[in-house]
Image: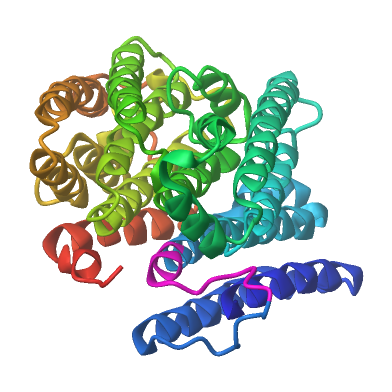
Amino acid sequence: MSTLIAVSALGIVCLLLDIFNLRKILIPFTLLALIAILGMSVAEFTSGESFIEPDKYNMIVTSAFAQGFSILFIILAILIIAMTPKFYEEKIVKIADYVALKVFMLAGAVAMVSFGNLAMFFIGLEVLSICAYALASSEPKDIRSNEAGMKYFLMGAFASSFIIFGIALIYGATGSLDIAEVTSSSISQGESLPVWFYIGFVMISVGMMFKASIAPFHFWAPDVYEGSPTLVTAIMSTLVKVAAIGTLFKLITILAVGLTPAYQVILIVLSILTMSIGNVTALKQKNIKRMMAYSGISHAGFMMMTFLAIETSANAVLYYAAAYSFAGIAAFAVILAVCKGKEDEKIEHFYGLIKRDPLLTAVLIGAFLSLSGIPIFAGFFAKFFVFEQMLQANHIVLVVFGVINSVIAAYYYFGIGNVMITKESASDAPLKAPFEYKIVALVAISLTILLGIVPSVIMGLSL
């Protein structure tokens, strides 16, 4: 509760600073405030007590799972906002709008994983989504951004209609939107549970799969990722995606009665389909943002495996989300630095990067090694823990397809590393990468390595 209130208040303060023409202190103030909120959230998590008493309507539930994901979201927001002033240096007069939208997006993500009532879940989802729509189309003179914003809005609205219809059916079957009452009512009714409960469960799942870009509901993601401003793509690829995955995991836990054998088979098929489509399609991409979009789709398939072992996989899904997000932020920080001032993000821009900036080359290779699942990076242990859960649940076929897809992914990730080292660049001049991008890239890849060396930081938590 306190985290959501603090983040929401910060978003309002960001807008007020703009009104009083205090843009110069906006970024430092926002970063310091987010660090303070992060410290407060960690203190709440370790103490097991909320600084603000839960509301009597149980709209927000302060659970260890919600706090763990909220801490991850705040760290991602800090890294993204640290790169914001340099990215928008030509639109500095509008910087407060961009920062406020990102902070409100963070508030929506926190509400999504902390909800105690399905109404609050939907509010959080829409807050996050509306901010994302606005940011995706925030380059009004760029036709690609206009197209991305329109596609994202249409697909998002379509997904939201599925979710709200599903919530209505769940309410009709259980008589409540409170998650505790929904869970107890669905369990107590047992086999007499109305069929529309299962229909509602499926509709909510489909809507959230759109948000998480899980195949076959992924078709919007590559165009939206490619057309959106690169910094927006970074936040959609990390914060938005892991918020959708974490929320869907929680929803399935709450509505576990609907996790029938038929539904589990569908989850297995969709997980395999998502991994395979994402990785195979990524092989042919010439634009690195589009490649990262398909890469993100494949990783959604890996995280989706945890839905088949909800009782034991809470730590695994949080660990995978953190490992994927930090590697993604590191990669996008390098992409921002390399493609700054260029019209597109073609892979040709990365030719011979090792001669122009060895440090950023090492960071990008490290990020791709983690996403491939290579030790000592966190991505290796993320896949290891997920595979372990699947073996314990006797879903061996998922592990087999997971290993195959990891090999496919390694091919195109290593392909980028290869051109950075062996190809000749069009220019041998040193890359003038902004300091902010370098710092964020180093911090993100350091967190990836840290989680790989000490996975107990997350896996040892009681979620």
Pinpoint residue 22: horizontal percent, then vertical percent: 82, 74
User: Is 459 placed left or right of 164 in the picture?
Assistant: left
* Residue at 72 percent of width and 30 percent of height: 157
| Residue 416 among magenta residues | no
Q: Nearer the viewer, residue 127 or 99?
A: 127
Q: Residue furthest right?
A: 19
In the picture, the quarter occupied by the C terminus is bottom left
Q: Nearer the viewer, residue 267 or 95?
A: 267
* Residue at 54 percent of width and 55 percent of height: 182
Pinpoint residue 167: horizontal percent, then vertical percent: 64, 43
User: Is 78 placed left or right of 47 in the picture?
Assistant: right
Asked which colour scheme the image uses, the reply is rainbow
Q: Residue furthest front?
A: 192
> Exactly how many numbered labels are in the figure?
0
Q: Is residue 438 above or below residue 328?
A: below
Q: Is residue 431 above or below residue 422?
A: below
Pinpoint residue 315: horizontal percent, then vertical percent: 26, 59
User: Is 97 placed left or right of 57 in the picture?
Assistant: right
Q: Nearer the viewer, residue 221 or 424?
A: 221
In the picture, the quarter occupied by the N terminus is bottom right
Magenta range = 57-69
Q: Is residue 145 above or below residue 448?
A: above
Pinpoint residue 145: horizontal percent, then vertical percent: 70, 26
Residue 386, by quadrant, is: top left
User: Is 350 placed left or right of 386 in the picture?
Assistant: right
- Whether residue 432 is visible, yes or no, is no
